[in-house]
Image (cartoon, rainbow, N blue to C red):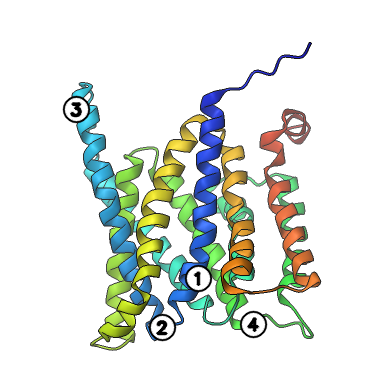
């Protein structure tokens, strides 16, 4: 008789991460529909990030109360929190702005899969901070490049504007992940997230007035408000909290693989809510890119591959 030992904490963590990925995937629809209104990407992101910041404030307050009641008050390093919020917020601002503008020129599914390339760019950019990328990552990069060719290049060797913006967004999110990795070890993660949303929101609102209308019209904002609220509170606030709780009981490699499924949910959401279809060539490109993303994570997931890689 075979006994299966199920770790309920790990199972719950995996399910929470899966739910977070689903929320992030469906948020691509909200972002796309939000750009149907005559508002700038900076307006959308400014309101979204500020809502995300506000949504996390109660979480911060409850966390402080729980720690105080347990007799373990958290001593914040305000200098590190300020620096972390600034750098992470700047990276988040750049990445989210590029992504939001991409929705003007491309579809939900394509943006979702190209954005998922951050899983490849993270180890590549990590080389500049003395984090050597293993050989399997380089293989994954070439495979992902072929997948992006199938997905984005049609007729001529030229990417459209939306594809290029999405690619820049993927690089921006890779920088953001490295910044979070740097500062999350020294400050409270929820407070860091709250701070980064505040910085990204302030920068977006400043750009809204600098590069957009000095007096944004209220009517389009009201029309896009449901999509902004979903992206701000549900995606930024709730999904981030689910990620924090889920990763407490899940291995980092497994967590990253689960969160990559946001790209799958983005394609499904685009088909379900926006009637956006993709050709067999584009679907094949998505499959190849997703395979490359998974391949890059295998050494940390399968001990034997990790041992061979270290030889």
Q: In this view, does 100 lie to the left or right of 275?
A: left
Using residue 89 as the reference point, say whether residue 169 is left or right of it.
Answer: right
In the displayed structure, would residue 256 be above or below residue 52?
above
In space, the residues marked 3 and 4 are separated at their CA atoms by: 53 Å
Mark 1 nearby-residue class (10 Å; few <14, some 14–19, many ≥20): many
- The total of numbered circles placed on residues is 4
User: Crowding at label 3, few (<14), some or many (≥20) Cα neighbours within 10 Å?
Assistant: few
Q: For mark 1, what is the residue?
A: 99
Give coordinates of residue 235: x percent, y percent: 42, 56
Label 4 sits on a secondary structure element that is loop
Going by the image, does 199 lie left or right of 150? left
Crowding at dot 2, Cα within 10 Å, few <14 / some 14-19 / many 20+, comes out as: some
Quarter of the image that includes the N terminus: top right
How far from the left and from the top, in percent, is residue 300? 66, 36
2 lies above or below 41? above
Gap between marks 4 and 1, in whole Å?
A: 14 Å
According to the picture, the residue beneath numbered tag 3 turns out to be 68
> Which residue has dot 4 on it?
160
């Amino acid at each position: 008789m075979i006994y299966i030992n199920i770790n309920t904490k790990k199972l719950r963590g995996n399910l929470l991460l899966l739910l977070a990925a689903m929320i992030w995937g469906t948020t691509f629809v909200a972002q796309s529909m939000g750009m149907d209104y005559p508002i700038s990407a900076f307006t959308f992101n400014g309101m979204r990030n500020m809502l995300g910041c506000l949504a996390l404030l109660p979480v911060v307050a409850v966390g402080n109360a729980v720690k105080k009641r347990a007799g373990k008050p958290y001593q914040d390093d305000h200098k590190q929190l300020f620096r972390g919020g600034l750098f992470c917020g700047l990276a988040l601002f750049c990445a989210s702005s590029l992504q939001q503008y991409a929705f003007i020129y491309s579809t939900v599914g394509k943006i979702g899969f190209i954005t998922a390339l951050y899983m490849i760019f993270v180890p590549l950019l990590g080389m500049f901070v003395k984090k050597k990328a293993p050989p399997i990552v380089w293989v994954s990069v070439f495979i992902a490049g072929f997948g992006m060719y199938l997905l984005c290049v049609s007729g001529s060797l030229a990417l459209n504007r939306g594809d290029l913006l999405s690619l820049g967004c993927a690089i921006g999110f890779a920088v953001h992940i490295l910044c979070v990795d740097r500062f999350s070890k020294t400050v409270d993660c929820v407070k860091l997230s709250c701070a980064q949303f505040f910085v990204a929101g302030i920068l977006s609102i400043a750009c809204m007035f600098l590069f957009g209308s000095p007096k944004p019209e209220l009517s389009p904002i009201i029309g896009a408000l449901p999509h902004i609220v979903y992206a701000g509170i549900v995606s930024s606030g709730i999904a981030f909290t689910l990620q924090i709780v889920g990763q407490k009981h899940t291995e980092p490699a497994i967590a990253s693989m689960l969160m990559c499924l946001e790209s799958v949910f983005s394609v499904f959401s685009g088909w379900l809510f926006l009637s956006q279809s993709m050709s067999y060539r584009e679907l094949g490109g998505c499959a190849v890119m997703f395979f490359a993303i998974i391949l890059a994570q295998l050494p940390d997931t399968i001990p034997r591959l990790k041992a061979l890689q270290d030889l």
